[in-house]
Image: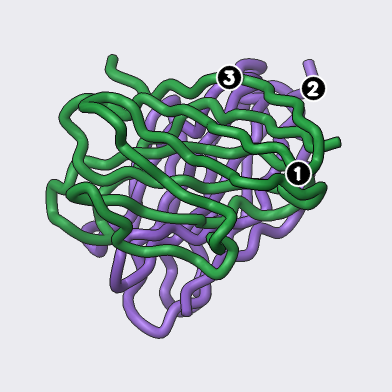
Amino acid sequence: EPEVTQTPSHQVTQMGQEVILRCVPISNHLYFYWYRQILGQKVEFLVSFYNNEISEKSEIFDDQFSVERPDGSNFTLKIRSTKLEDSAMYFCASSEPVSGGPKDTQYFGPGTRLTVL
Amino acid sequence: AQSVTQLGSHVSVSEGALVLLRCNYSSSVPPYLFWYVQYPNQGLQLLLKYTSAATLVKGINGFEAEFKKSETSFHLTKPSAHMSDAAEYFCAVSAFTGNQFYFGTGTSLTVIP
């Protein structure tokens, strides 16, 4: 069964460093997402991406964050200058727009645990 | 705005007992609701979803959930717990406009042999 994959599974970085989290969405999906979960808190939406541009973003997704689909398979989340509070589990998801809206199931990857020291 | 609340961050049941994981939603419009399960070191896997068809939704692994508008609830149940059901369970509601999901804080299910 097709699945979303994410690399690395765990990333440790120093505060102020740039990190890139990578995701390979399911191949025929057209919508891509990033969510994060700070330990003990809710899974929070960061951004959605469609047709090579951001379609929605949350307040969390400030100028420190960017997303890119550099080729036909990868979807990346870049954090330019990491802060301690960026430590979280980051989930990538993708969806096939069967109905083109909120009914569409999002398929999630296993997550990347980011630790900022 | 949509939101969900999951009551009970940890639930323990004996093997063979009923599983009941609670989810209440807040939405000003008819919601689309989802339950996901996360096994250790794996991604969020869809268990079932409600999209305004039948109010009783059957999912994978013997789970089901009932949409109750009067109670604004979408509780997840399974008649008989199995050891393999031990995992983290997340309830989510999708935004009426746009595609983002709003998740609950999750419920960790422990199954006691």
Q: Quadrant of residue B28?
A: bottom left
Question: Which of the two residues, A73 or B21, is positioned nearer the viewer here?
Answer: A73
Residue B46: where, in percent of width, then height? 41, 36
Q: Position of residue B32 (x, y in %)?
A: 34, 62
| Residue pictured at 42% horizontal, 75% vertical | B69
The chain under label 1 reads A
Residue type of the residue flagged with mark 3: Pro
Asked which quadrant contains residue B111, the reply is top right
Is A55 situated above or below B8?
below
| Residue B47 visible somewhere in the drawing | no
For the residues marked 3 and 1, what is the alpha-carbon distance in whole angstroms?
Answer: 19 Å
Of tags 2 and 1, the one toward the viewer is 1
Residue at 68% x, 22% y: name it.
Answer: A10
Q: Position of residue A66 (x, y in %)?
A: 47, 49
Chain B visual colour: purple
* Position above or below: A89 against B96: above
In the displayed structure image, the side of residue A68 where residue A43 appears, left or right: right
How far apart marks 2 and 1 lie (CA) works out to 44 Å
Between discs 3 and 1, the one toward the N terminus: 3
What residue is shown with label 2? B112
Q: Mark 1: which amino acid? A: Gly
* Chain identifier of the residue bearing label 2 in the image: B
Mark 1 element type? loop
Please name the residue that numbered disc 1 is placed on.
A16
Mark carried by residue A55: none
Q: Chain of mark 3?
A: A
Quick one: which chain is green? Answer: A
Question: Which residue is at 42% across, 51% downward?
Answer: B34
Q: Is residue A17 left or right of residue B61?
A: right
Residue A8 - label: 3
Asked if residue A72 is positioned above or below residue A16 in the image, the reply reads: above
Q: Could you say whether the residue bearing mark 2 is in a helix, strand or loop?
A: strand
